[in-house]
Image: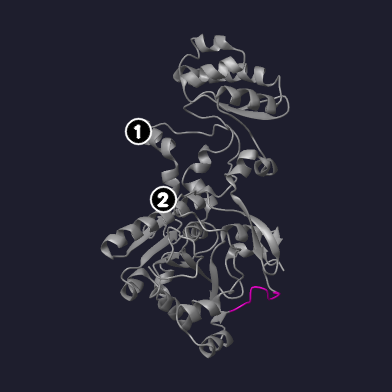
Amino acid sequence: MKQSKQNMQQTSLKGARVIDLTRVVAGPFSTTILADLGADVIKAERPGVGDDSRSWGPPFVGEASSYFLGLNRNRRSIAIDLQSPEGAQIIRDLVKHADVLVESFRPGVMERLGLGYETLRQINPSLVYCAISAYGQTGPYKSRPGYDLMISAMGGLMSVTGTPGGEPVKTGVALIDVCTGLHAAIGILGALYHRQATGEGQRVDASLLGSQLAMLINVASEYLIGGSIAKPQGSAHANVAPYQAFPSKDGWVLMGSPNDKLFGVMCDALGQPQWKHDPRFVTNGDRVAHREELVALISDVTRQHPTDYWVDLLSSTGAPVAPINTMDKVFQNEQVQHLAQVEQVEHPLFGSYPVVTSALRMSATPPVKAAPAPRLGQHSREVLSEVLGWEDDQIEKLIAAGVIEFREAGEPFQGKNGS
């Protein structure tokens, strides 16, 4: 693998170089995983505009949205006009020095730019090329525009999300994008492992629709095997009872009993040991069949005390329980703070801001410390000079021609994205 300027600590992907031609969520989520693991991720963006999510605010920090800042840490930005022959050639030149390329254009676009897999593998046979798309690279829907929300509707997730009889509801986070990013990163890591043994690169395809289908897990298998069409359950679980939110004196408390033993523990904690022997509730199957009666009984008890009372009581007995926290309470939580997954990053122009960092904890090769998301084109000069060995006058000509864009980290910006 190639050498990078990533920090000097030992990391899992130290020395790997990734060319990132993605934007918005799924692609950047995947390349952030690689960056956190120590890869040198070079993000190529459109001059003057950059990644769409740079403008998805408020809130903003300086010119960039918090949306962009949270998804694009630990990478370098180069601004290149890929529509120009010179810009496309820069990517081909960078591929000679890269281990991975990730792109999220509609199928066929990279080929029209002269940057398709078959072209790039001739330049670098060991390249791992990952294409992220909405519906996949082939098939009747391959050219349709697709976003997380559309896929969640078509792919079935929205049909099982929300309350019984209610209007269609999307998830509060773009889970399909996130899951697709995870699949892409896993595929890339698998391809790198294969390459280490054989020297051979390969193409990795990850689609939002394919990831959505994989996410359906039991909901899909219940239909495919049993013909059962799942419906929205609110906070409840179709196959487990009790396993949902219950009203408390001051809000809601989420409780669950995924097995008979834990149901008994919960009954004792609620002061209702007789429920353990009630023929309606002895097994999970019984409880699912008599869910409405059981939920009504539990609700009558939980309404008598505040949420914190139930959380403290049930957690002390080993029964599964949790409050339903808003974001402020999430990041005030003592366990969340113990995980130390929020880091302050220092930007030379805009000061410090917090980001959620990698969820991974690795004993020998921990993820790198978070670095701020780059400004658009911040590293154009650096990358072309360091990776391709270009001289200043060669770079200046392309800047003057509008093929590439460069902006110093601390240079004030008057542009489109939040300024």
Q: Which residue corresponds to mark 1?
A: 225
Q: CA distance from mark 2 to mark 1?
A: 19 Å
Residue 348 higher or lower than 167, as above or below: below
Which region shows up in magenta? 406-414
Identify the disc placed on residue 210: 2
Label 2 residue SS:
helix
Image quarter (top left, top right, bottom left or bottom right) of the N terminus:
bottom left
Q: Position of residue 249 (x, y in %)?
A: 72, 24
Closer-to-camera residue (286/108): 286
Compared across the picture, whether 77 is left or right of 86 comes to: right
Residue 218 higher or lower than 209, as above or below: above
Type of residue at label 1? Ile
Colour setup of the view: one colour
Q: Position of residue 130 (x, y in %)?
A: 40, 62
Find out whether residue 236 is within the magenta segment.
no
Find out whether residue 409 is within the magenta segment.
yes
